[in-house]
């Protein structure tokens, strides 16, 4: 694990283009994501955050499940795994346990993490294994034509809720916090620079970090829910629908009602799982 | 003070990667970009201020703004 501090500031604010090429598998681009899909913006923020940390490609392992978001490892030149639906956390746990020196990143979607992988998600958070979990939250299963996911807001239209959803949604951050994750944050694809900073902190944190990232699926969620285009969708959901932690603290509660709070929401210190295991080995073997 | 040379920029759009989602043009503070056909194009390069927001929000790794 490299800890050398790089010269540049976080977020990237230099007046020249950031060079993503060393982190990408050029032959795989252009990616399969639809026009306007926020996943590409999130990936770019992640790569800038990794660059700021100065991590080398071979020191990073990226694991994913199934879904649009889980295509991410295919485009990056790290040690990557594209695994079973919802089971990315289980594979990531194995990777980290086998080689604790690797920096493990899990990219997963809202359906992948919270519906099919809900069980694995809470146990990954409970164990506090050093990994960074990125939940790309677009409220929908985009790859299979727009079924509603557990984070879909009440009243939202999807393939499986043609007249509006009647289910209350999951709050990813509250769930992760309750399950025991030691770093919980939320970002949006619209606030890409803020997201880069949040991801930088999440990657640096030792222990399970969960970052819930709101991004847009214009192809299904936008079309079903009467969003004219992706820009309008980003404005209404990500820009106007969210409020930063600092602003939320200043404003009276009635003004923040109905808005989603973004930023670093929870941070705690707790024994990391690999360290705990090492302690156990030391204790048992020395007797 | 208006005589000071304004910094010039060059915008490169990779037409093989651009999917024409219009995010860069919608969030450009100076209205420098536009959708032409199925990909983005530069409308007025002189208005570009090099803020890099189009690059940062482009989901397709398609646009880059270089200082001249």
Image (spheres, rainbow, N blue to C red):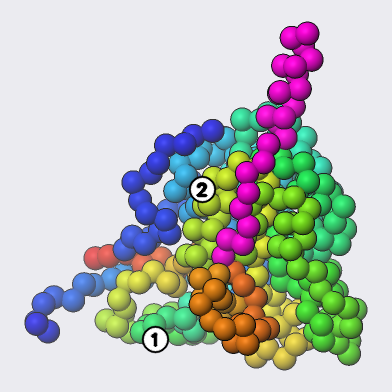
Q: Which residue is under mark 1? A: B31
* Residue B60 x/y as whole percent: 55, 66
Task: Please state which of residues B2 and B8 is positioned toward the viewer in this rendering.
Answer: B2
The chain letter under disc 2 is A
Answer whether residue A234 is visible to the viewer in this image: no
Q: Residue at x 66, y 84 (%)?
A: A257
Q: What secondary structure is marked by label 1? A: loop
Using the rendered view, name the quadrant where residue A187 is placed.
bottom right
Quarter residue B11 falls in: bottom left
- Please, what secondary structure does the residue beneath circle 2 have? helix
Q: Quadrant of residue B47?
A: bottom left
- Left or right: residue A239 versus residue A119 is left
Residue in the image at 27% along x and 65% along y: B67
Q: Magenta span has A285?
A: yes
Identify the residue at horizontal 74%, vertical 63% (top origin).
A174
**Which label is found at residue A50?**
2
Tell me residue B36's x, y (percent).
Answer: 49, 85
Q: Is residue A195 left or right of residue A19?
A: right
Q: Looking at the image, which residue is at 54% across and 45% down?
A: A204
Tell me the distance, in whole angstroms, between the alpha carbons under discs 1 and 2. Answer: 31 Å
* Closest to the observer, A43 or A185: A185
Residue at mark 1: chain = B
Does the magenta run of residues contain A57?
Answer: no
Dot 2 crowding, Cα within 10 Å, few <14, some 14–19, many 20+: many
Query: What range of the chain is rendered magenta?
Result: A263-287
Relative height, residue A215 to residue A255 (above, below): above
In the depicted structure, whether residue A198 falls above or below residue A125: below
Which quadrant, please, contains the C terminus of chain A?
Answer: top right
Residue B3 shows in this picture: yes
């Amino acid at each position: 694990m490299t800890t050398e501090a790089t010269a540049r500031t976080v977020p990237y604010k230099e007046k020249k283009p950031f060079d993503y090429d060393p982190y990408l598998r050029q032959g795989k681009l252009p990616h399969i994501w639809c026009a306007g899909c926020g996943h590409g913006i999130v990936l770019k923020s992640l790569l800038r955050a990794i660059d700021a940390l100065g991590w080398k490609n071979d020191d990073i392992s990226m694991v994913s499940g199934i879904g649009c978001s889980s295509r991410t490892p295919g485009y990056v030149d790290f040690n990557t795994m594209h695994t079973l639906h919802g089971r990315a956390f289980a594979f990531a746990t194995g990777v980290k346990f086998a080689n604790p020196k690797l920096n493990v990143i899990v990219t997963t979607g809202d359906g992948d993490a919270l519906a099919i992988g809900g069980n694995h998600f809470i146990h990954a958070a409970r164990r506090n294994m050093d990994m960074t979990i990125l939940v790309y939250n677009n409220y929908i299963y985009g790859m299979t034509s727009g079924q509603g996911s557990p984070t879909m807001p009440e009243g939202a239209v999807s393939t499986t809720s043609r007249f509006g959803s009647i289910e209350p949604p999951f709050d990813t951050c509250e769930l992760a916090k309750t399950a025991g994750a030691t770093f919980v944050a939320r970002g949006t694809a619209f606030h890409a620079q803020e997201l880069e900073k949040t991801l930088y902190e999440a990657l640096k944190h030792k222990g399970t970090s969960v970052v819930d990232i709101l991004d847009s699926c214009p192809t299904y969620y936008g079309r079903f829910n009467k969003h004219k285009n992706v820009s309008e969708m980003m404005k209404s959901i990500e820009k106007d629908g969210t409020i930063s932690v600092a602003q939320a603290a200043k404003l009276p509660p009635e003004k923040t009602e109905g808005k989603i709070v973004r930023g670093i929401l929870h941070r705690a210190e707790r024994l990391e799982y690999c360290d705990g295991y090492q302690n156990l080995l030391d204790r048992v073997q020395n007797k | 003070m208006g005589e000071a040379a304004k910094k010039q920029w060059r915008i490169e759009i990779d037409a093989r990667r651009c999917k024409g989602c219009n995010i860069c043009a919608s969030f450009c503070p100076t209205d420098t970009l536009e959708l032409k056909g199925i990909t983005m194009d530069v409308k007025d390069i002189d208005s570009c201020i090099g803020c890099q927001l189009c690059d940062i929000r482009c989901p397709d790794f398609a646009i880059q703004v270089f200082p001249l």
